[in-house]
Image (tube, coloured by chain):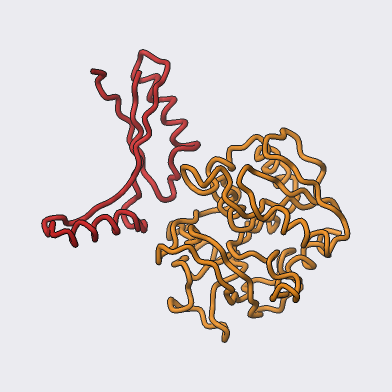
Amino acid sequence: MKSLVKIMPKKGVLDPQGKAIENSLKQLGFSQIKEVTQGKIIEIEIDSDNENDAREILEKVSNKLLANLVIEDYEITFPKED
Amino acid sequence: MKISVIVFPGSNCDRDVSVSLKKFSNKDPFMVWHKETSLPDSDLIVLPGGFSYGDYLRCGSMAANSPIMKEVKKSSKNGSAVLGICNGFQILTESGLLPGTLIRNKGLSFLCKNTPLRVENNNSIFTKNYKDKDIINIPIAHNEGNYFASENVIKEIEDKNLVAFRYCNHNGDIDIANNPNGSLNNIAGIINENGNVLGMMPHPERATDKIAGLSDGEKFFTSIIESLK
């Protein structure tokens, strides 16, 4: 099944890429843009037909490798396949 | 004295550091490929600078999970000294051998220059040949050298006197103006509580020969080698 791990910088942690995007958008004239944060999404195809089992494994891999909990939070989702 | 230098795909300071280690120990270090599952008996293990795994995901994150790192962790628990320089420091934080992490430089630029450091703790095996508050010139070369940790962790590091080096100016002043990368409390290098693991962003191996410009890194290597003899 298909899963997504979304990894975002924790609040208050320096996010220079988000800041740079934000400044660029403002420079382009989009004055409505208030704040931009950049993270990453990792798409994982996992051999499991049960979301709970899959989530357990994905939490392990997120804690072990995908995210650094000192500076990042993660969120696991299972998008519906087309 | 037995020394191992771990070589990851993308390490590029492994040769430089082994030249410096040999200069002061008169012995060739073992060069150990990251895929090895056993480590030669070592008094000192060095994780060199570079761009292991192309800095993919986060600097040092893939290397921290290399097969050899299990052995490095085991040896460090058994008392071997572990030194991480630049990418090696990033690998040490990613593998949990040192607290905190290293994030993107505050000014967003790759920094490559000689930087004054103040020796904050000369009671360690890595720094004993320096005088307390010595000001030394050591090059930095990094994009992610901004030391970050939670408030509690920073407090613990400071309370336990685990900062080895701080960025400063030539007078030893420690402030924002003399903080090249935004590191909390101008931290350039830290030691673990047991005193056998040190990580630092600056490159002492690039300051061990006057012909090449700088020699303030010599005392760093003589400290370690004399301590572990």
What is the total number of numbered labels drawn onto the structure image?
A: 0
- Residue B103 occupies quadrant: bottom left
Q: Is B105 on the left or on the right of A51, as rendered? A: right
Kindly indicate which chain is depicted in red in the rendered structure: A
Q: What quarter of the picture does the C terminus of chain B occupy?
A: bottom right
Q: Nearer the viewer, residue B152 or A74?
A: A74
Q: Residue furthest left?
A: A32
Q: Work out whether A1 lies above or below B35.
A: above
Pinpoint residue B68: horizontal percent, then vertical percent. Answer: 68, 38
Pinpoint residue B208: horizontal percent, then vertical percent. Answer: 74, 70
Q: At 48% across and 77% down in the image, what residue appears?
A: B178
Q: What quarter of the picture does the N terminus of chain B occupy?
A: bottom right
Can residue B187 be seen? yes
Q: Nearer the viewer, residue B110 or A7?
A: B110
Q: At 46% across and 57% down in the image, what residue appears?
A: B149
Pinpoint residue B86: horizontal percent, then vertical percent. Answer: 59, 58
Q: Nearer the viewer, residue B68 or A59?
A: B68
Can residue B128 be seen? no
Q: Nearer the viewer, residue B210 or B177?
A: B210
Pinpoint residue B120: horizontal percent, then vertical percent. Answer: 62, 73
Kindly indicate which chain is depicted in orange in the rendered structure: B
